[in-house]
């Protein structure tokens, strides 16, 4: 879909793929992404497959796969639901292989997820990040997420919708100065 300016010569492609088609590669990326954070990961191939299948069942159209030079190096899953009249977005998973870290893929896929969720006109977007995953935490802060709870293992974050954004079907109201 797009090339990444931070990595000239490499082509990032972010696409929607059915996880069943690429399950072995997704398991590998998941294991690589969590190798330094085992306390936040599912353990064992069968549990990882079960987890990924569960995400797919919850939000089949929300699964994004990132490729670099025809190799899967990351994936992400977004979710959307309504709760007490509000439209809530959720970033359910972001996994980037160390083979692709430091090249801007995390930021690119996060911004794409936020763009997709903005189409649902979400009032806010939630995510959780492992307390020890400082790199991801800083990235989430840079794009506007704020911490609202730390339970000792996970930091829960939220990004409020921009106050100047209105649904496309609603025209901005103008003051009557007459």
Image (cartoon, rainbow, N blue to C red):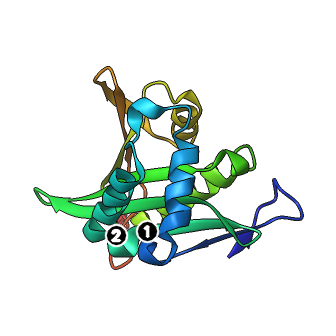
* Percent x, y of residue 83: 14, 57
Which residue corresponds to mark 1?
63
Residue plotted at (37% across, 30% down): 155
Front residue (pair 116, 128): 128
Residue 42 appears anywhere in the view:
yes
Is 20 drawn above or below residue 101 in the view shown? Answer: below
**Helix, strand or loop at mark 1:** strand
Report the side of 65 relative to 88 (left or right).
right
Label 1 crowding class (10 Å Cα cut-off): few <14, some 14-19, many 20+?
A: many
Q: Position of residue 169 (x, y in %)?
A: 34, 79
Return the residue at label 2.
120
* Residue at 83 percent of width and 64 percent of height: 10
Q: Position of residue 34 (x, y in %)?
A: 51, 40
Residue most extreme to the right: 9
Quadrant holding the N terminus: bottom right
Q: Nearer the viewer, residue 122 or 153?
A: 153
Q: Position of residue 19 (x, y in %)?
A: 44, 72
On the image, which quarter does residue 80 sit in?
bottom left
Question: At x 26% / y 66%, what residue is drawn?
Answer: 58
Seen from the viewer's position, the closer of residues 52 and 146 is 52
Q: How many marks?
A: 2
Quick one: label 2, few (<14), some, or many (20+) residues within 10 Å?
some
Extreme-top residue of the structure: 152
Element type at mark 2: loop
């Amino acid at each position: 879909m797009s090339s990444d300016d931070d990595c000239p010569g490499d082509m990032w492609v972010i696409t929607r793929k059915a996880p069943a088609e690429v399950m072995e590669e997704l398991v590998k990326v998941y294991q690589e992404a969590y190798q330094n954070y085992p306390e936040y990961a599912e353990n064992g191939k069968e549990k990882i497959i079960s987890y990924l299948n569960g995400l797919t069942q919850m939000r089949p159209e929300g699964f994004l796969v990132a490729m670099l030079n025809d190799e899967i190096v990351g994936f992400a899953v977004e979710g959307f639901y309504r709760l007490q009249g509000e439209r809530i977005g959720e970033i359910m998973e972001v996994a980037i292989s160390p083979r692709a870290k430091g090249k801007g893929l995390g930021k690119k896929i996060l911004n794409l997820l936020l763009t997709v969720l903005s189409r649902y006109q979400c009032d806010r977007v939630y995510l959780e990040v492992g307390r020890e995953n400082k790199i991801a935490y800083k990235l989430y802060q840079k794009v506007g997420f704020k911490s609202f709870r730390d339970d000792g293992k996970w930091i829960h974050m939220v990004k409020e919708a921009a106050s100047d954004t209105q649904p496309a079907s609603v025209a901005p109201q103008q003051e009557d100065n007459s």
